[in-house]
Image (spheres, rainbow, N blue to C red):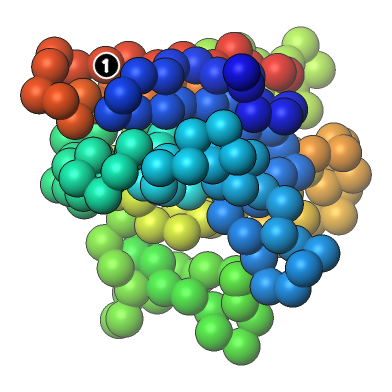
């Protein structure tokens, strides 16, 4: 049995991984109208599934749950200790002049405008994103990028891309109106996740096909 609307990428006694679609919350929001989410759908099938990390509502891709508190603790520790390799795909506005690069800009919550985040060199937490151009559009209007976050700050990829002049297409928080209008969804996808299995087995690689 699979959770409604959620393709299962992996399921065993320790770990569940699903492909979360864009537009779905990872965990419940405030109010009954925001109760539907990936976590509640997964728990309807596996009641012991506990969230390990989150994806923004607009972001699609690999989302992992630990089965039971101990599996959740081990997986959460792997994320906190940066023993998880993440690969995202994004379509950004414009084409970077370099083929690869690294963004190192400290981030903090823009509290009066939350959930927006912002660059703050005095109070922000260190944040690092590596990027690589995979394919520029023929007209130069957009480019497909591989994004590798070394840190896992809220909205990190979205803010870092906007900060270097290449906001992610369809980003309702950080893209200008003309870039937002280019797509009905945020073109950001968690394509691949490699992490240590909580049972102590070898590293597990999980992939979700990119929908754009």
Dividing the image into 4 quarters, which one contains the N terminus? Answer: top right
The one nearer the camera, 24 or 121, is 24
Q: Residue 56 placed where, x, y %? A: 59, 50
Q: How many marks?
A: 1
Q: Residue 142 placed where, x, y %? A: 72, 27
| Residue 149 visible, this angle | no
Quarter of the rendering containing residue 4: top right
Q: Residue at x 52, y 68 (%)?
A: 117
| Residue 120 visible, this angle | yes
Asked if residue 121 lies left or right of residue 146, the reply is left
Q: Residue 17 placed where, x, y %? A: 45, 26
Q: Residues within 10 Å of mark 1 (few under 14, many from 20)?
A: few
**Residue matched to label 1:** 204
- Helix, strand or loop at label 1? It is strand
Q: Residue at x 10, y 24 (%)?
A: 200
Residue 127 against residue 207 in the figure, above or below? below
Quarter of the rendering containing residue 179: top right
Q: Residue at x 54, y 42 (%)?
A: 43
The one nearer the camera, 22 or 8, is 8
Asked if residue 111 lies left or right of residue 128, the reply is right
Q: Residue furthest bottom?
A: 112
Q: Residue at x 48, y 75 (%)?
A: 109
Q: Residue 50 placed where, x, y %? A: 40, 47
Residue 136 against residue 42 in the figure, above or below? above
The one nearer the camera, 210 or 69, is 69
Asked if residue 155 lies left or right of residue 165, the reply is left
Quarter of the rendering containing residue 100: top left
Asked if residue 45 lies left or right of residue 109, the reply is right
Dividing the image into 4 quarters, which one contains the C terminus? Answer: top right
């Amino acid at each position: 049995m699979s959770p409604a609307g959620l393709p299962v990428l992996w399921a065993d006694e320790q770990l569940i991984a699903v492909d979360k679609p864009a537009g779905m919350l990872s965990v419940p929001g405030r109010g009954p109208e925001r109760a539907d989410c990936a976590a509640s759908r997964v728990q309807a099938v596996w009641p012991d599934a506990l969230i390990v990390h989150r994806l923004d509502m607009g972001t699609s891709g690999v989302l992992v749950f630990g089965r039971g508190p101990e599996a959740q603790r081990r997986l959460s520790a792997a994320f906190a200790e940066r023993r998880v390799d993440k690969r995202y795909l994004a379509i950004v506005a414009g084409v970077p002049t370099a083929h690869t690069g690294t963004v190192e800009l400290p981030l903090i919550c823009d509290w009066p405008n939350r959930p927006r985040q912002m660059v703050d060199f005095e109070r922000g937490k260190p944040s690092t994103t590596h990027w690589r151009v995979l394919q520029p559009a023929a007209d130069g209007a957009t480019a497909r990028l591989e994004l590798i976050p070394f840190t896992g700050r809220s909205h990190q990829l979205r803010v870092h891309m906007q900060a270097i002049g290449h906001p992610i297409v369809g980003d309702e928080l950080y893209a200008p109106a003309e870039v937002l209008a280019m797509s009905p969804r945020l073109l950001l996808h968690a394509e691949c996740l490699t992490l240590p299995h909580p049972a102590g087995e070898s590293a597990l690689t999980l992939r979700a096909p990119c929908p754009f």
